[in-house]
Image (cartoon, helix red, strand yellow):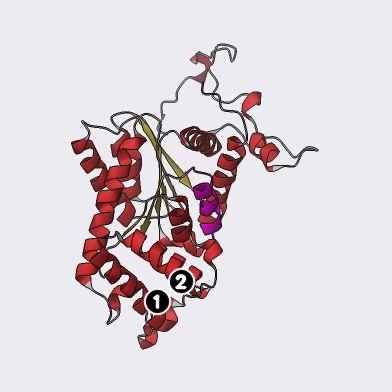
Amino acid sequence: MTEYREADFSRLKTVSIAQRPNKVDASLLGQPPGRDQSFAAFWRSLPDILAAKDLRYVADQIARAAGRRAVVVLLGGHVIKVGLGPLLRELLARGVISHLALNGSAAIHDFELAAFGGTSEDVARGLADGSFGMAEETGREMNAAVAAGARAGRGMGEALAEYLRGRATLAAPEVSVLLAAAAAGIPVTVHVTIGADITHQHPSADGAALGATSHRDLKRLAASLPALDDGGVVLNLGSAVVMPEVFLKALTVARNLNGGKPKGFTACDCDMQRHYRPRVNVVERPTLAGGRGVQLTGHHEILIPLLCWAVLEQLKRPSDDP
C-alpha cells in the first residue's frame, strides 16, 4: 500500500481574533423595519457593505454636486422604455442634472411617449413581415424635426424638443425628458449611430441632417464636461455601447481644450449586466487621473428609482459644505 504524505495540522499556528482586522462589524449590518417606515428609514437600514455602500456613495456625490458641479447623465433607450422618465424629469426640475445625453433609441421612446402616448413595439412580430420600426408618424415627424434642426443650426436634442413644444397636440408631455430638459434650460443632446435606429429606415430619413445635428451635439456634450472637474458626476444609465463610446471621445476633446481637465469626478455605470465598454470607457479609464469609478448592477426599473429617491432625499438635508 502506498503511503501518501499529509500536512501536520497539529503544527498550524493560529492567531487571536482580537488582533485580526475585520471587514464587517455590527455597525455595518442591515436593519429590519421599525416604526419609521419612510424611504429615509429604509435607506438608512441598508447594510453599509459592497453594492449598498457604493450606491450610498454615488447618491451622496450626486447630491453634493447638484448646482455646484456638472452631473452628466448618459441615457440608453431601455431606461425610458421601462418608465423612468418621470424620475429623471424630477432631477432635471430640481437642478440636479446639468446635461442629458441620449442615444437614438432613448430619444425615440421619449418622443413616442410624449407625442402618441405609447412606445415599445413587438420587434419579433414586426420583423417577420417587415413592419418593425415602420410606424409612419414616428419616422415622418422625427425626421422632419431633425431636418428642420439641421437647417436652423440646432443639435438633434434641441431640434426634437423644439418640435415637441410646437406640436399641436401631445398625448403625454408630462413624461418627456426632452421637454423637461428644454423647460429647465438644460442641454439635451442626442447621439445616433446611423442605421441603428428605426427612424433611419424611413423614406424621410436625411443622412446629412442626422450627421450634422448629432455631430453638433457631440460638440455640446464636450463643452459641458469641463464642469465635471473636482467633484462632478457622470452617470451611464443603460447604454452598453453608444454612449460610453461617445463619452470617451467627448472627454478627450474636453481635456484637449482644457489643459487635461476635467479630472477628479465620479463615474458610475448602472446597468442590468456588466459590459466591457461602460466599464473601461466610463468607469475605469476616465478616472485613472483621479476620482472614482463605480459599477452598480441591477434591473433599471429597481436600481435607478433607488438612486433617484436617495438623491432627492439627501437634497432635503442641510449641506455639509461651507
- Mark 2 surroundings within 10 Å by alpha-carbon count, few (fewer than 14), some (14 through 19), many (20 or more): many
Closest to the observer, 236 or 212: 212
Q: How many numbered marks have been drawn onto this rendered protein structure?
A: 2
Residue 256 coordinates in the image, percent (x, y): 18, 37
Q: Is residue 204 left or right of 306 when viewed as pictured?
A: left
Residue at 64% in and 31% down: 29
Residue 140 coordinates in the image, percent (x, y): 35, 79
- At mark 2, the secondary structure is helix
Between the residue at mark 2 and the residue at mark 1, the CA separation in whole angstroms equals 7 Å
Closest to the observer, 166 or 234: 166
Residue at 30% in and 48% down: 221
Q: Which quadrant holds residue 20? A: top right
Task: Inspect this view and state whether residue 250 appears.
Answer: yes
Magenta stretch: helix, strand or loop mostly = helix
| The furthest residue to the right | 35
- State yes or no: residue 88 in magenta: yes
- At mark 1, the secondary structure is helix
Q: Which quadrant holds residue 319? A: top right
Instruction: Specify the quadrant that holds the N terminus.
Output: top left
Q: Amino acid at mark 1?
A: Thr
Closest to the observer, 170 or 206: 170
- Give the number of the disc on residue 112: 2
- Mark 1 surroundings within 10 Å by alpha-carbon count, few (fewer than 14), some (14 through 19), many (20 or more): many
Q: Amino acid at mark 2?
A: Glu
Reading the image, the residue beneath label 1 is 138
In the picture shown, does residue 9 fall above or below 253? above
Residue at 58% in and 42% down: 312
Residue at 57% in and 53% down: 302
Span shown in magenta? 82-96
Give the mark, 2 or 1, whose residue is nearer the N terminus: 2
Disc 2, disc 1: CB below 8 Å? yes
Residue 150 coordinates in the image, percent (x, y): 25, 65
